[in-house]
Image (cartoon, rainbow, N blue to C red):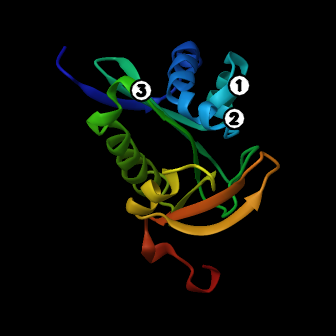
Amino acid sequence: MNNRISFRLAMLEDAEALLELTLRAYAPIRELGIHFAAATADLDLVKKNVLNNACYVMLRDDVIIATASLRMPWGQQPGPFGVPHLWWFATDPATSQKGDGSAFLHWLETAVVKDQLKTPYLSLGTADNHPWLIEMYERRGYVRSGSADLGKGHLTIYLKKTILPHLINKSNT
């Protein structure tokens, strides 16, 4: 193995590998009793995600080690701010301390959101009762920007990160 890292859009053929990765990565979420769709995903939900969102994968030597999706404002599940909304972010727990998640998130923010989509913000949502996710995203430059009770047993905290500040409409922030 040469530790070659690559990124691409997920394909339907990746669905089984994505499901296995997701269920392993979200095991701690299930143990916390937090209701994220990805935590109890099945093969049909994975396929729906791949078909309806921009689902990306990070590979090491052609093996998927991370996945994340962008829900678009025009899609079936838009985020709250009219910009791409990050969700279903999972990294392989076997490599979780190697910086793969940070590298993948950085790639999504720059190569996709900034360079391809040219979007001023990226948003995400997480559970208010998760013990460390909000703080982790805040350390990465995300700012709390709202909340909602989506009926999942927790308050969803929305965060957004400025990606291209010169595109921000100052009267609409």
Mark 2 and mark 1: span between their CA atoms?
9 Å
As shown in the figure, which amino acid type bears the numbered disc 3?
A: Asp
Residue 39: image quadrant is: top right
Q: Which residue is mark 2?
A: 37
> Which mark is first along the chain, 3 or 1?
1
Q: Which of the image's four quarters has the C terminus?
A: bottom right
Q: Tell me which residue sits at (34%, 17%) in the image.
A: 62
- Vertical placement of residue 6 versus 84, above or below: above
| Residue that sits furthest to the right in the current view | 151
Residue 38: image quadrant is: top right
Q: In the visual, does 67 lie left or right of 129?
A: left
Mark 1 and mark 3: span between their CA atoms?
19 Å
As shown in the figure, which amino acid type bears the numbered disc 2?
A: Ala
Q: Which mark is residue 45?
A: 1
Q: Which of the image's four quarters has the N terminus?
A: top left
Residue 64, given in percent of the width and then of the height, sits at 41, 22
Tell which tag, 2 or 1, sits nearer the viewer: 2
> Which mark is first along the chain, 1 or 2?
2
The local secondary structure at tag 3 comes to loop
Q: Which residue is mark 3?
A: 92
As shown in the figure, which amino acid type bears the numbered disc 1?
A: Leu
Q: Tell me which residue sits at (42%, 52%) in the image.
A: 109
Question: Marks 2 and 3: in contact by CB < 8 Å?
Answer: no
Mark 3 and mark 2: span between their CA atoms?
18 Å
Q: In the visual, does 124 lie left or right of 45?
A: left
Tell which tag, 1 or 3, sits nearer the viewer: 3
The local secondary structure at tag 1 comes to helix
Disc tally is 3
> Which mark is first along the chain, 2 or 3?
2
Residue 124, given in percent of the width and then of the height, sits at 58, 54
